[in-house]
Image (tube, grey):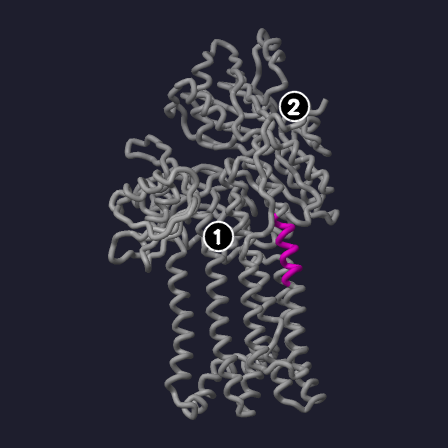
Amino acid sequence: MQCQICHESRGRMRVHMDQYRMTMAQADQLEYYLYKVPGITDASVNDRTANAVIRYEGSREDVILALAAFDYAEAEEAPEESGRAILHEYEERIAFHVLKRIFVRLLVPMPIRHALMPLKAIRYIAPGVMSILSGKVDVSVLDATSISVSLLRKDYDTPSSVMFLLGLSEILEEWTHKKSVDDLARSMALNVDKVWLVTDDGTELLVPVQEVESGEKIRVRTGSVIPLDGIVVSGDAAVNQSSLTGESLPVSKSEGAYVYAGTVLEEGDIVIEVKSASGTGRYDRIVQMIEESQKLESESEVKAKLLADKLVPYSLAGTALTWLLTRNATRAVAVLMVDYSCALKLCMPITVLSAMRQASAAEIRVKGGKFLDAVAGAKTIVFDKTGTLTASTPRVAKIVTFGDNDEVEMLRLAACLEEHFPHSIANAVVEEAARRGIQHDEMHSKVEYVVAHGIVSHVGRRRVLIGSYHFVFEDEKCRVRKDEIDKFNAIEDEYSHLYLSIGKKLAAVICIEDPIREESRRVIQQLNALGIDTVMMTGDSDRTARAVADRLGIRRMYSEVLPEDKAQFVRDEKSRGRIVLMIGDGVNDTPALADADAAIAVSNGAAIAREIADITITEENLEKLLELREIAMATQERIRFNYRMIISVNTALILLGVFGIMTPAATAYLHNFSTLALSLHSMTDLPVKQRKHVSAETVQQPA
């Protein structure tokens, strides 16, 4: 596309696109395109001027070639929400508000303005009167009192300025809040999920959720999030709808029942006929989730709101005392023009929203301010081992077969079963089959998942099991042939083991190499240095678990535990008055995740773990936990800074008004200006140091 370079400096250029008018959609499309061009580090497109400001590293010619190659018809569509519409809406509202005041003051005669002033004031006086009648004394009472007193004194300039500032403040506060929510929602709306599509001949295909259309059928199994609204056409399930309805217990769903996107299938297996395609309302649902998460206020937000309401009577008392001591109504009104409530109620939630946005930009999704509080005050952190402390991509080291079974056929069968219930160990089996080029079409009947144990199905008339030693040998009473016991005992303990049984007889043992994450030891060391008690709980054998705990410096380790054991440990720690974080990635971690003060899930784990979790780490780096801790601590520090600034600035303004140094209008202007300035500061990124991924060479192993 043709364009003209308007200004250029090193690593930066401003270009004007050769078109008469640019729509918001076109601006979003161009900006999205530029961000994806290699070498461009930042791009901003102004739809009103059709200008683009581009910052780049590397070749200037590459940027020019990318601009020349751009075409609206061929370029990829931008994401549905960009924030540009919100920006336009509030820019126009602010401009109209300011221009209206200028127009009125220049063109409307003063007697008419004064006559209309009481009518304009009703909007601000009425809420104050209603608050008093309902037995509450809040900030609306202060506004109503200051405006009423000024009007009774026939001081029309002060209430005019106050009402203008209050209107402007309302617009800016609403804009600030919406922008914070919008920034966070857009950063969270980029995840792409896949679903099992059921074709007309009954075959199941794993496809991106965006490709599913209304009327098509998808299968959802235990531990998965229902991705789309629809009607159950076959199967039975228990669905957790707490994220939608607040119900604590799962709801039974069978044929004909309606199910909703975002709810979790805790148990069962259902086929759903899709009623709403992906993308319809996805952004709106995320915004709704964020708005709901704001109900999970941090302790700081709750305290700020309580303090704001408690300070209003003191402001009124200060006004009365000033009048009694000075007999000067102007000085008394100057006190009324300043209050602590607005800043307290605005800055604290914005600080928390901004922290959540910054965490989201760092690939950490936080569902509410109270969970940042929990991270900042955590005394115990409980880790699952597999997929959390160990690599999220374990590998199949070898397959030991028993009886007359063929290794390839056993891997084919195992992959066929495991692909339906994603977990890091299951993924390793599926990926090994893919690496060997083994096709594993459905060869079994209905698959049943037994939480923390394994999978049950049938091939022909034979019962097939795959899972833990406890499940296969102790619960299901499977056995090893006598002439193969020595072979069985010779399997190395250094691996995690998956046992495959056919018809009550051991068919194969799949040995999983489960390497420790490169950064795990460093993370544990830093958490220990902070005085946080680190605990590892796993279903693995004691020998395997102890070796991992010793290498990482884990202070406490529990092996061969069941899901209920993890949950009970979390409850016991909380009963001791300790704030507990739980980090896991599997269906078997969900009871403990639900009981923790803050539950942290790893992104590649089971969908139900991610849904129940209060915080999700979406990048393959456990050091994000340390970054999350820094964000939480920095949030606390900013909140303390806000308290200090609000108290000191507003107290100074009150004193300046009391001593007659400033007029009521001046204190009102400075009060509103300081509140907005502090709100804008609260929206900026927290001072958190950037962390780099730790290479294997930098990890110190114990002697």
Q: Residue at x 69, y 40 (%)?
A: 569
Q: Residue 155 lies in magenta, yes or no?
A: no
Look at label 2 and name its amino acid.
Thr
Q: Residue at x 48, y 28 (%)?
A: 427
Residue 177 seen in render:
yes
Look at label 1 and name its amino acid.
Leu
- Please name the residue that numbered disc 1 is placed on: 184
Residue 424 in the figure: left or right of residue 382: left
As helix, strand or loop, the secondary structure at mark 2 comes to helix
Q: Which residues are magenta?
A: 631-642
Residue 170 in the figure: left or right of residue 53: right
Q: Quadrant of residue 145?
A: bottom right
Residue 345 % position (x, y): 58, 66
The vertical placement of 469 against 577, above or below, is above
Q: Main secondary structure of the magenta part?
A: helix
Q: Residue 632 lies in magenta, yes or no?
A: yes
The vertical placement of 677 against 22, above or below, is below
Residue 457 % position (x, y): 46, 26
Name the residue nearer the viewer: 448 or 396: 396
- Please name the residue that numbered disc 2 is placed on: 544
Residue 15 in the figure: left or right of residue 129: left
Q: CA distance from mark 1 to mark 2?
A: 41 Å
Residue 348 % position (x, y): 59, 61
As helix, strand or loop, the secondary structure at mark 1 comes to helix
Q: Residues within 10 Å of mark 2 (few under 14, many from 20)?
A: some
